[in-house]
Image: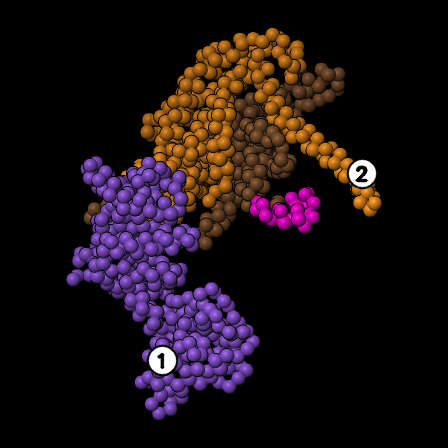
Amino acid sequence: MAPILDIKNLYKSYGATEILKDINVAIEPGDFLVLVGPSGCGKSTLLNCIAGLEPITGGAVHINGKNMTDVSPKDRDIAMVFQSYALYPTMSVAKNITFGMKVRGVDAATQAAKLAEVAAQLQIEPLLNRRPGQLSGGQRQRVAMGRALVRDPALFLFDEPLSNLDAKLRVEMRTEIKKLHHNLGASMVYVTHDQIEAMTLATKIVVMKGGVIQQIGTPAEIYNTPANLFVADFMGSPAMNLIPASVRRDGAFHRIEIQRDSAEPLVLADQRPLNLPDNVIMGLRPEDIAEAGFRAGAEVQEANCLIDMVEPAGADTYVVSQLGGKQVTARLHAETSARAGQAMNLAFDLAKVSYFAPETGERLN
Amino acid sequence: MTKWLERQVPKMVLAPTFAAILLFVYGFIGWTAWVSLTKSKLMPRYEIEGFQQYTKLFDTPRWDTAMNNLFIFGALFIVISMVLGLLLAIFLDQKIRTEGVIRTIYLYPMALSMIVTGTAWKWILNPGLGVQAMVQGWGFETFTFDWLINPDYAIYTIVLAGVWQSSGFVMALFLAGLRSVDGEIIKAAQVDGIPTPRIYTAIIIPSMAPIFLSAFIVLSHLAIKSFDLVIALTGGGPGYATDLPATYMYAMAFSRGNIGQAASSAMIMMAVVFAIVVPYLYSELRAKHD
Amino acid sequence: MTDATIQTARSPRKTSSRTGRIVLRTLLYVFLIAFALFYLMPLFVMLTTSLKSLDEIRTGSLIALPRDITFEAWKTAWSGACSGIRCEGLRPYLLNSLMIAIPGVALSTLFGAMNGYVFAQWKFRGANLLFSLLLFGCFIPFQVVLLPMARVLGILNMAGTIPGLIFVHTVYGLGFTTLFFRNYYVTIPMELVRAAKIDGAGFFRIFWSIFLPLSLPIIVVTVIWQFTQIWNDFLFGVSFSQAGTQPVTVALNNIVNSTTGVKEYNVDMAAAILAALPTLLVYVVAGKYFIRGLTAGSVKG
């Protein structure tokens, strides 16, 4: 099947400043692509380039098999939901949703039918005669989605659509967007700075930084095998522990040595077939460090660590220990006996470890 | 092709305005500057002769008076309007019950034409039947208030009328400024036990620097352009004791038939305005770009 | 016991500070009312003088109320006072001012709205420079354009005509009207235009369907500002009009300064009030918008 969206060697600059550098992304029909990264990484600019709202400096954008690089936004067969919703303030909800059809000269009967269909789908029938100013944040969000849905486009674009909602509503709407994607089987591109949103919604994630794509992959790939230190640090909460370590080769396996201030170095043995340099940064997610005895597996190794801090978080308890000069967080079960200031045995799951080169930050394994 | 055309629409919409501004503002300034360097009299001539018009201008006693008057009038008008405007604003800021009514009264002169203002004050200040006659009628036979016809004092009547017209506006500017100061800062100061006058002098007024600046710009702009007020109140007289550059320029252009002098005096006026306004606008525009 | 001592010790101070407060508040009100009287006095004097007979003006006090109210002066000011050699009162000139102001306001507001829309929402390379040029144009003393404008109006056959004055007021009003609309439209999020573009609307459609319906407040501000400016203008009026096409400010000045016959102060005052009435009315009816225009016109940016 032809990709629904294909971006080839896209460059974008304002004067001398390059905003986007050599962007290459393609998605299949039905994909939910999330562009994620810190603010200023170019993700919103990229979305605007896909929409045709910003001219690009180089490269090409294909949508549904057609080269849309020089085509007006209205002819790209897309719909877009904006961060501020961008509802037309002087028009009623119904007029907001039908404005695009009216501009295109769609006949009144079709307009009414489509409006009714979308309103039912989003359960906004009672709101149709109100002005945007009279709606709550969540209702505005629905209307903005309605305006996009009614177009029935090849590609939906979302620009941080949930960032203006409060935490509870955000989770609700997230679920609804996911449901919508599932029911419509539509192709979507979604921009967010919230990595949890990215993980929960995406079928494919693009992590960006400084206008450059850092990694493209499924949520699981991004989470389990981050391509570099930036991705490792950015995705996941609490963040992946990134611990400087030195490596000694010992026959078939690697001895990973981590310095500690108040005790002997912590030594772990990685038995996987690797080829590591002398110095690495070891990445291990908090959930891959457990209380001794609570984690089983061939690669699990235990070590005695001094606990600096205990943070109960309800379902889990996080403990912090000083390793390799870094605060290392471990995610333990809620009823742990860990006490701040006391040592305890922690289990490290070495099967899950990522290694990065300290100089380049690139993944080594 | 259509997309290219689409992109040109905003420019085409601006084009008439741009052309008008280019021609009628910048082109005309150029024309006036050019003519100010010629020997134009009744009709403009276009052979450049140098700065003779300017030399002549500064040798003319009437221009001297006009510039002097501009500085006297400008300085007093600006200072008094600002002080009065600030005082009125601070006093009105004390939770005055009838604030709306009082504000409306203070500000209405700004809606009047300077010609109306001049006409009214000319009547009030005329010695024969105005304030002087009124006070004399109360029994103070020796009271004199003849500034309007006294060449040494006539310029102050223009200051008076100008302040009457514009101080309410300055008050409105300052009042808006006072109200825009962060309420939490004031509350913090009150909790610290700082007395109200100190809160004004140490916290509120310093934070209004931009408003002082824009009030100053507007007032100086008004002062330099003042033409109607002088015409209506004193007609530039007695003699030419209350001439301002604006009235001088007008007299040269339309009654004396001396286009060269008119052009050079207009250029000097513009130089004075720009000396004040350009640094201000420049900083404003730059601040916006950052 | 201790409570009682504290109470008695404190109460005198409390009362003294309270009386002090009352004295201060009274002084405050006295000051504010005194200035209110200062601002009102000329209007009061104009009104009373216009209702007096000339005899009463000569014999009575400036601020005395009229003994016998007469509307003779108003009648003369309306239809009989002499401006130059014509003695038709202020009526034809009020009409002139209206005929200048209405198209002048409409045109400069229309252009200003379109320009402001471009500057705020359709920026292109060089737009900032253009806007700066326009802004500087707001500040020039008009004396610097009087001479060439007189010649251009002559070339266009518009010298001394009402269309000529409409033209001049439109051109030199553009700076401020553009500024007003631009500053208003800048506060409207850019996403609105983007959403409309995706909906397929073009430049004019977006302006007409989305921006114009939002613009009522700024239209009111601009119309009031421009109307006040044009109505109260004297410099352009006196420079570019001739007998018969003068605006009301010029005619008023002529009436007041006409040297023929007896000086009719009551007629002068009635004429001055007539000339001021339209803008005064606007101020009373829409003072909020008037002030907003003034402050917007002064606080640039």
Residue for badge 1: A297
Q: What's under tag 1, amino acid-wise?
A: Gly
Residue for badge 2: C12
Residue extending furthest toward the left: A1
Residues at marks 2 and 1 touching, judged by CB atoms closer than 8 Å: no
Residue at 55% across, 39% down = B176
Q: Which chain corresponds to the colour brown?
A: B
Pick the front one: A198 or B61: A198
In the image: residue C19, left or right of residue A93: right
Pick the front one: B192 or C233: B192
Circle 2 — which element? helix
In the image: residue B228, left or right of residue A103: right
Question: Magenta segment, which residues?
Answer: B181-202
Residue C265: in magenta span = no
Coordinates of residue A207 in the picture (x, y in percent) = 34, 65
User: Numbered disc 2: what chain?
Assistant: C
Residue at 27% across, 40% down = A99
In the image: residue A126, left or right of residue B219: left
Coordinates of residue A230 in the picture (x, y in percent) = 39, 70
Q: What's under tag 2, amino acid-wise?
A: Pro
Report the magenta stretch's main SS.
helix
Visible in this render: residue C83? yes
User: Numbered disc 1: what chain?
Assistant: A
Residue at 60% across, 18% down = C45
Chain C representation colour = orange
Q: Nearer the viewer, mark 2 or mark 1?
A: 1
